[in-house]
Amino acid sequence: MRYQVGGSLQSDDSTYIFRQADEQLYAGLKAGDFCYVLNCHQMGKSSLLQRTRHRLEKEGYICVYLDAILLGSKETTPVQWYKGMIVSLFYGAYLVEQINFQAWWEQQADLSPVQRLHQFVEQVLLQKLQSDRIFIFIDGINNLLSLSFPVNDFFAWIRHCYERQVYNPNFKRLGFVISGVVSPSDLIVDQYRTPFNIGRAIELCGFQLHEATPLLKGLEEVVSQPQKILQKIIHWTGGQPFLTQKLCQLVLQVAIENSKKKITIPPGLEGFWVEQLVRPRIIQHWESQDEPEHLRTIRNRLLFHKHRAGRLLGLYQKVLQAEEGENEERIKNSIPTEDSPEQKELLLSGLVEKHNGYLRVKNPIYRNVFNTQWVLRQLDNLRLYL
């Protein structure tokens, strides 16, 4: 058995962890809701979409999966981007034999790009496909931020599709889910056109121990205390999907290095054994051995914009200080969650999470890598830069 470290898991992967978000997304789409999964990197968003897509397809529904990064970049014009979206729907829904796309496209020459998209969905997609439901999955929606034109019209169009259900019941067959590393306020500049008040937010949390039993199979082959080892792994990762899979894979790697079929760990020493794995192979010299990249992605997101990096580091420093204090001091200095740009960006970095109305560092690995000394060094570097 091998664990998947990075990338999207196949829909039938044995290490896929079924979480509450799986049922929430499935139920939301079946109920006709516009669903969105907006979270930090490497939390399993793409795997969740692929798994849900596979589940719906097994029930006979048509699902089209679109990767927003393939639809265009900064140099892409609105016409090119919307045409890319329509072409992706055209091929994704297997309409090649039912319509001459080039002829149809030329007939829409007098329409704006978003009007062409609407015409395609209403007159082609919903007319040619006989499935009771059609679900459109759009992943990597944060890539829309790099476009040279605003995306308000696109999201306004999605909202319009849901509003059309009142006048055209055929639109009740259509469902959308979007996913990406972004907050709703980043996507919608014009708050009066936001579609998110009609949607359902799907919260994607880390693995809980009782959910993570599919990961035991590989551990059972190589260690004597697999359940205890998995418990200690999740303690260090906080259930963060990428790190959890990586640590499980490291356990297998240690067994191979020691040429042992099974490593015997004395009862009570499981925590010590996992710590001796985590510190030299993940925490120490992390910048040089962070492969596939994870910790460097967090670092880069914090420091990328020099003009706001200081505010993010300052906020994170307060979260660290609160957690390092005694009980009364910790409660007094805890940072309440709020809707500020700095908190949104810090949450999207993946470094912190919301817990009982306050911010906290997501796991001990992050706390050890991005510790107080690291923060102070970065703040000193920023002062030199400024």
Image (cartoon, rainbow, N blue to C red):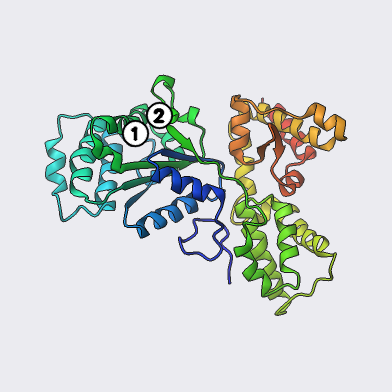
| Quadrant occupied by the C terminus | top right
Q: In this view, does 299 lie to the left or right of 186?
A: right
Residue 355 lies, in percent from the top left, at 69, 37
Report crowding for label 2: few under 14, some 14 to 19, many 20 or more residues within 10 A (C-alpha): many
Give the numbered dot on residue 195: 2
Q: In this view, does 326 lie above or below 221?
A: above
Find disc 1 in the rendering and name its residue. Answer: 158
* Vertical relation: 7 (above or below) 310: below
Q: How far apart are marks 2 and 1 (CA)?
A: 7 Å
For the question of whether residue 384 can be seen, the reply is no
Which amino acid does the dot numbered 1 rest on? Ile
Is residue 283 among the parts visible in the rendering? yes
Question: Helix, strand, or loop for circle 2?
Answer: loop
Percent across and percent down for residue 130 are: 22, 51
Left or right: 350 in relation to 23: right
**Residue closer to the observer: 64 or 181:** 64
Left or right of residue 261: residue 80: left
Q: Nearer the viewer, residue 12 or 79?
A: 12
Kind of residue indicated by mark 2: Pro
Circle 1 — which element? helix
Marks 2 and 1: CB-CB under 8 Å? yes
Above or below, 187 against 236 in this view is above
Residue at the image position 13 percent from the left and 49 percent from the top: 100
Q: Which residue is drawn at 18% across and 48% down?
A: 128
Q: Which image quarter: residue 321?
A: top right
Is 362 on the left-hand or right-hand side of 81?
Answer: right
Q: Residue 114: x, y in percent?
A: 26, 32
Q: Please state the horizontal and vertical placement of residue 194, each as a whole percent of the image.
A: 41, 26
- Give above or below for 120 relative to 309: below
